[in-house]
């Protein structure tokens, strides 16, 4: 995989560089960005190309709704970089705008997923239409690199292709996470244990401690024989060999919510039929603390509780401990990072913040991704 900075700067001047960026944002009801991490990172590659005198054409997607536009992306990105936005993809407005570009300008085109069927199917004609806009292709969308879409794996077959700085840095840090120094700790949350099962099995062979939090911890508690009340559980439960693995850390206590919305901390044996587990508890944090303090490497993906319902206390408490650790740290999952950024946790103390959620986990499971392979 070659990075764009391996191309002589003089060879970039005047070239149309097609950058597939990962600018997918979570939006509030007013249409404003909730988490700007991806847009904060994006200017590194875009500015490098702009400063080199390239004509930079940015492709990206937002959400799953085909009616979404990149207008809020452009509005937010303007805070970090001077860009022009054209609400068209490869029609006359887009082609005219590309033709009129001056050296160093950055142009953002419309949401790729307005053509989602073609994008998802890696349609060859769709990829060719996109590739016709540029002379060079750069993949800087690590967050979407696990998807074999036209803009990810189709265009690299048609143009000289390189990694952007985000993709380069993600691969470097996640490769280290596959071969961590010891002792090593991983904290993994989320829902649907069946989707996390392969990566947890892999982690148990590589990491000294694997701490499960969030909804997947309910599945582990259930297999261990504890009641989980009306808590969220997965369709497929973990094997008993996984749930009882000596490297696996499950919650020692849990925060539960009763039907009247009152929250209290209980031992797993005390969870009632009407209780809903919404987070871990202080005993779990106390058990986790020495592993955080003694680790040389910490990997974290997923909040500890139902943060969307306001249960963010223990996620923040874990983060505060991690900021005091001298370990090398890699953190992923947009939900976790957005929550911690809002809480005021010192970002520098959290280590490398990955822009990928699903892409991060798939890379850690397989050691590569379809769009990474397409650059080779």
Image (cartoon, grey):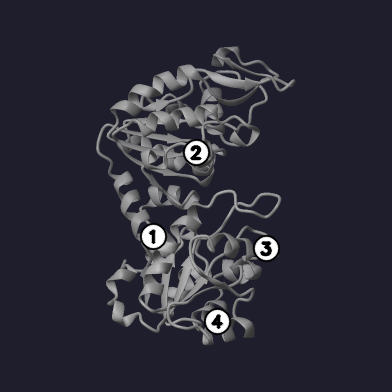
Q: Is residue 188 left or right of residue 129?
A: left
Asked if one can make out residue 328 in the rendered structure from this viewpoint, the answer is yes
| Pointer 1 with pointer 2, Cβ within 8 A | no
At 31% from the left edge and 66% from the top edge, which residue is drawn?
Answer: 1
Secondary structure beneath label 3: loop
Disc 1 target residue? 167
Give the spatial CA distance, label 4 vs label 1.
24 Å
Task: Please give the label number shown on residue 129.
Answer: 4
Please tell me which residue lies in front, 348 or 140. 348
Which circle, 2 or 4, is nearer the viewer?
Answer: 2
Q: Nearer the viewer, mark 4 or mark 1?
A: 1
Mark 4 falls on what kind of element? helix
Query: Which dot marks residue 42?
Result: none
Depth check, front residue: 168 or 341: 341
Mark 2, residue position: 340
Sequence order check, earlier mark of 4 and 1: 4
Q: Position of residue 56 (x, y in %)?
A: 46, 75
Helix, strand or loop status at disc 1: helix
* Whole-number angstrom distance, CA of label 2 to CA of label 3: 27 Å
Q: CA distance from mark 4 to mark 3?
A: 21 Å
Marks 3 and 1, how far apart at CA: 25 Å
- Identify the residue under disc 3: 68
For marks 4 and 3 on the same chain, the one whose residue lies earlier in the sequence: 3
Image position of 242 with respect to 269: above or below: below
């Amino acid at each position: 995989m070659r990075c764009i900075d391996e191309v002589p700067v003089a060879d970039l001047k005047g070239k149309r560089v097609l950058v597939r960026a990962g600018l997918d944002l979570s939006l509030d009801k007013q249409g404003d960005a909730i988490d700007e991490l991806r847009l904060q990172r994006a200017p590194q590659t875009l500015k490098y190309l702009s400063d080199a005198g390239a004509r930079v054409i940015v492709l990206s997607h937002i959400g799953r709704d085909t009616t979404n536009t990149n207008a809020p992306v452009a509005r937010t990105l303007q805070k970090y970089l001077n860009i022009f936005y054209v609400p068209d993809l490869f029609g006359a407005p887009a082609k005219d705008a590309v033709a009129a570009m001056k050296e160093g300008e950055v142009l953002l085109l419309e949401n790729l997923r307005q053509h989602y069927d073609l994008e998802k199917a890696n349609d060859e004609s769709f990829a060719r239409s996109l590739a016709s806009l540029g002379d060079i292709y750069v993949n800087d969308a690590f967050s979407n690199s696990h998807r074999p879409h036209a803009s990810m794996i189709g265009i690299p077959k048609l143009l000289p292709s390189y990694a952007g700085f985000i993709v380069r840095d993600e691969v470097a840090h996640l490769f280290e996470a596959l071969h961590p120094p010891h002792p090593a700790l991983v904290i993994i949350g989320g829902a649907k244990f069946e989707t996390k099962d392969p990566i947890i099995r892999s982690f148990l062979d590589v990491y000294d401690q694997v701490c499960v939090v969030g909804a997947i911890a309910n599945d582990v508690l259930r297999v261990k024989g504890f009641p989980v009340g009306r808590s969220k559980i997965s369709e497929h439960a973990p094997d008993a060999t996984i749930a009882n693995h000596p490297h696996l850390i499950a919650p020692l206590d849990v925060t539960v919510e009763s039907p009247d919305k009152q929250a209290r901390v209980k031992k797993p044996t005390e969870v009632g039929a009407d209780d809903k587990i919404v987070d871990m508890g202080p005993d779990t944090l106390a058990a986790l603390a020495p592993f955080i303090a003694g680790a040389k490497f910490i990997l974290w993906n997923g909040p500890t509780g139902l943060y969307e319902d306001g249960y963010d206390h223990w996620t923040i408490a874990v983060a505060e401990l991690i900021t005091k650790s001298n370990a090398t740290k890699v953190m992923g999952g947009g939900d976790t990072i957005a929550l911690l950024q809002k809480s005021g946790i010192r970002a520098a103390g959290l280590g490398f913040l990955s822009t990928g959620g699903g892409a991060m986990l798939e890379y850690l499971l397989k050691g590569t991704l379809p769009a990474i392979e397409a650059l080779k």
